[in-house]
Amino acid sequence: MIPPAFDYARPSSVDEAVRTLAGAGDEAKVLAGGQSLLPLMRLRLAYPELVVDVGRIPELRGVREDGDTLVIGAMTTHHDVIADPLVRRHAGLLAAATATVADPAVRHRGTLGGSLAHADPAADLPAVVLALDGELVAQGPGGRRTIPARGFFVDFLQSALAPDELLVEVRIPKADGWGFHYEKFHRVAQAYAIVGVAALVRRDNGQIAETRIGLTNMGATPLRASAAEHALSGAGDPDAVARAADSAAEGTRPARDTAASPEYRAHLARVLTKRAVLAAAGMG
Amino acid sequence: MTHISVKVDGTTYEDDVEPRLLLVHYLRDRLGLTGTPVGCDTSNCGACTVELDGAAVKSCTVLAVQADGSEVTTVQGLAHDGEWTGLQRAFHEQHALQCGFCTPGMIMAARDLLREHPHPTPDEVRQGLEGNLCRCTGYQNIVLAVLAASEQEVTA
Ligand SMILES: Cc1cc2nc3c(=O)[nH]c(=O)nc-3n(C[C@H](O)[C@H](O)[C@H](O)COP(=O)(O)OP(=O)(O)OC[C@H]3O[C@@H](n4cnc5c(N)ncnc54)[C@H](O)[C@@H]3O)c2cc1C
Ligand code: FES
Ligand code: FES
């Protein structure tokens, strides 16, 4: 279908984009890669009056280091995230999970920032950035602010961004020395996850010292599997990991839809957590 | 209306378009390049795949205004003087199509795949074409065609 009519702006700097958004109130939408927004507009599930295309703002693209942190521009495409040597070296979990997103053509257009700002609990990257303890930097009329991933995903398709704020970059603490794995369960090619588990594991003397687990599609927002993270401390063999992974669905509220019941999703969270942690710990 | 300038299959076009016009409709309805079909409403099928500045994209999920200043290659821009590319020949020789509806998108996606993996494994071919659906062939001959093209070291 054809999207509803809208006005179009293509600012060439972040400052200009923020001014344009501020002038438009609630009726404007940022257009990043368009791989979520344009399908919604074609189905007439979204009808902004003004579309602010941030695709031609060079400062929003690319990856750089800032001490112990990787800084990824919001408009860096999935394709470029996967290929980036800094991401591969210091945030391998993000590269691995991004490679499971959609298909190559969608990954050429879709962006990390768009994926996070969209705040879809079924999308892969929100849970990954949550597991990586990332921070999101937003710029609005009042300047910049930094939002921890834990506070960014507010509700289904709702982030902490105000309508006049632009997500400008994603800051990820380097995860050097952590094993990682993203375990995605879906039934057909290019489909969204029914459940996904992002795991980071730090080992010490053969035992698991610390684990961070992000859950995809286990509630209205991406979640950390805090009970399982806690229970995994000190696990030294696959049986201990399996026992600890039994608490992976604690505190979650998965949805019922055509793909799965809440009970089935809880089962998947436990099984996939076990697999993801074993793989991340090199015990698989 | 927004003014755009786009180079499509080697020819530069200047046009005023509504911002909501999708690139695929610009190609088909404005430029008459109907070799690029529309197969779905949900960005899933990949039939509309073209190259935008050298990278495969789903042209139903790009606005024409987003292509302003860019270069687009459609399946109609591949042959030179009526001579098919090696990849096109491989699709023909391996019987990689039945109704042909998915073929333009398959070929554009396969070019992208061969740029990233010049000598792909069968599994890499399947992964690379994951965004393109075919309702006829069962994919087997499409995979064979892409593998055959890569063995001939055709750059497509
Ligand atoms: C066929 C298909 C399959 C897919 N499969 C998957 C999948 O398996 N896993 C997955 O995770 N995703 C999947 N996606 C979604 C894809 O990853 C999108 O790229 C992503 O969700 C949105 O990124 P975008 O840059 O395209 O954002 P857009 O579509 O441009 O924007 C999405 C939303 O975020 C807002 N926004 C974007 N950027 C900013 C910013 N910088 N500041 C403020 N607001 C902003 C927009 O206003 C809009 O509301 C799929 C998409 C398609 C079409
Ligand atoms: S027409 Fe189906 S993906 Fe574009
Ligand atoms: S040949 Fe008919 S859809 Fe692929």
Image (spheres, coloured by chain):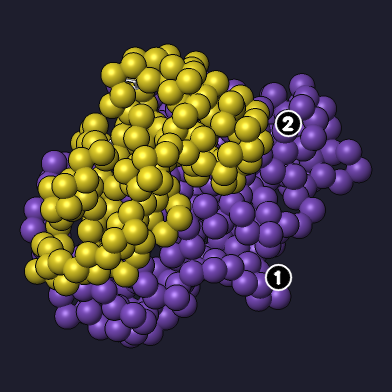
Chain colours: A purple, B yellow
- The chain ID associated with circle 2 is A
Between B124 and A27, the residue placed more toward the observer is B124
Can the viewer see residue A121 in this picture? Answer: no
Vertical order, B143 against A94 (above or below):
above
Q: Position of residue B50 (x, y in %)?
A: 35, 46
The type of residue carrying mark 2 is Leu
The circle on residue A278 is 2
Label 2 to label 1: alpha-carbon separation: 27 Å
Instruction: Left or right? Give the position of A172 relative to A143.
Output: right
- Return the residue found at the far front: B81
Find out whether the residues at labels 2 and 1 contact each other: C-beta distance under 8 Å. no
Tell me which residue sits at (32%, 43%) in the image. Answer: B76
Q: Label 2, secondary structure: give it.
A: helix
The type of residue carrying mark 1 is Asp
Can the viewer see residue A24 in this picture? Answer: yes
Instruction: Left or right? Give the position of A89 relative to A71.
Output: right
